[in-house]
Amino acid sequence: MSFVKNRPVLFWGSLTTILEAAIGLLVVFEIWTPTAAQLAQVMILIAALGQMFVFLIQGQVTPTQNPKDDAGNMLTPGTIGSDEADLPPI
């Protein structure tokens, strides 16, 4: 699953949202009938854990794992020139 490797923060944020939506559907279709307090506790726990994962993972990733130029070519140390004249204009 390259998506998890390439965009871990987006993956964990999306997983949290999907889990909360699934719990909401279980409640709406009366498959699970928690009290209001139980539902609130579960949703708060999921939101807090999801945010904690996002916060911890964000510090561990680089801004982009697969950098590309405007033409879509992969940027690697070998393709970037050492001369300032090779740098794109700002």
Image: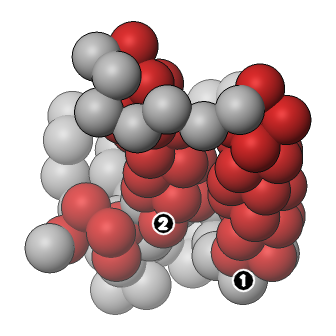
Viewer-nearest residue: 42 or 81: 42
Q: Quick one: label 1, few (<14), some, or many (20+) residues within 10 Å?
A: few
Identify the residue position indicated by label 2 in the image.
8
Query: Which amino acid type corresponds to the residue marked 2 in the rendered image?
Result: Pro
Of the residues under marks 2 and 1, which one precedes in the sequence?
A: 2
Residue 86 visible in the displayed image: no
Q: Quick one: label 2, few (<14), some, or many (20+) residues within 10 Å?
A: some
Q: How are the residues colored?
A: secondary structure
Viewer-nearest residue: 47 or 6: 47
Q: Measured from the top left, where is residue 24 in percent x and y? A: 47, 24
Residue 64 visible in the displayed image: yes
Q: In the displayed image of the protein, which residue is found farthest to the top?
A: 28
Q: Measured from the top left, where is residue 2 in percent x and y? A: 19, 71
**Measured along the vertical axis of the image, is residue 61 above or below residue 50?**
below
Q: Measured from the top left, where is residue 5 in percent x and y? A: 34, 76
Horizontal arrangement in the rendering, residue 27 relative to residue 57 (left or right):
left
Q: Residue at x 35, y 44 (%)?
A: 69
Find out whether the residues at labels 2 and 1 contact each other: C-beta distance under 8 Å: yes
Q: What distance separates the C-alpha of mark 2 from that of mark 1?
A: 10 Å
Q: Residue at x 75, y 64 (%)?
A: 49
